[in-house]
Amino acid sequence: MKKLTENIRIVHVITAKIMMLSLFLVLTMAAVTPAIAGTKNNNAEAQRITGIQNRVKEIQAMNFRQLSATEKKGLKKELKTMHKELRNMHPTYVYISGGGLLLIILILILLL
């Protein structure tokens, strides 16, 4: 009887490890999918992104001690608007397939 419960425990541990590995693989693919889908940039977006990068480099090169408080606020506001613009160009999404979602639900049911 003791040997039987030990074997059942080993089977449960192996099953849990396989499920965790498959969950890891599903979540990895879900994280990679947006990066692959987001690589299509048109020319105007690419030019705008390089323009924003150049402007940020210009702002970083400035001497902030010589600027007044209103100029500093203006630069901060400009950086925030550029950051929002970049986020709106490429929003972040996580795609989980139907099979992946089903697998996650099954793992949660088995573990809980």
Image (tube, rainbow, N blue to C red):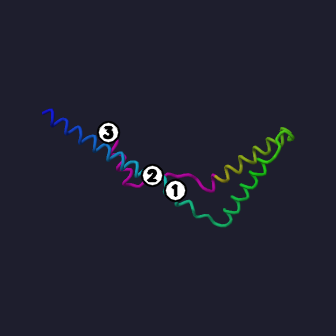
Give the main secondary structure, helix, strand or loop, of the magenta stretch. helix
Q: Residue at x 47, y 54 (%)?
A: 95
Amino acid found under the numbered disc labelled 3: Leu
Residue at the farthest bottom position: 43
| Numbered tag placed on residue 28 in the rendering | 2
Task: Report helix, strand or loop for mark 2.
Answer: helix
Secondary structure at numbered mark 1: helix
Which residue is pictured at 76% across the width and 47% down the height? 60
- Residue 1: percent from left, percent from top: 12, 33
First in residue order: circle 1 vs circle 3: 1
Q: Which residue is mark 3?
A: 111
Q: Which residues are magenta?
A: 87-111
In the current view of this chain or complex, which residue is farthest to the top? 2
Where residue 20 appears, as percent x and y from the top left, is 36, 45
- In the rendered image, residue 98, in percent from the top left (x then y), is placed at 38, 54
- Depth check: 69 or 54 in front? 54
Q: Label 3: how many residues lie within 10 Å, few (<14), some (14-19) or many (20+)? A: few
Residue 18, label in figure: none
Distance of label 1 from label 3 (alpha carbons): 29 Å
User: What amino acid is labelled 1 in the image?
Assistant: Pro
Side (left or right) of 52 relative to 63: left
Image-quadrant location for residue 17: top left
The amino acid type found where label 2 is placed reads Thr
Residue named by callout 1:
34
Instruction: Answer whether residue 68 is magenta in the image.
Output: no
Query: Who is closer to the viewer here, 75 or 18?
Result: 18
Of residues 58 and 81, the one nearer the viewer is 58
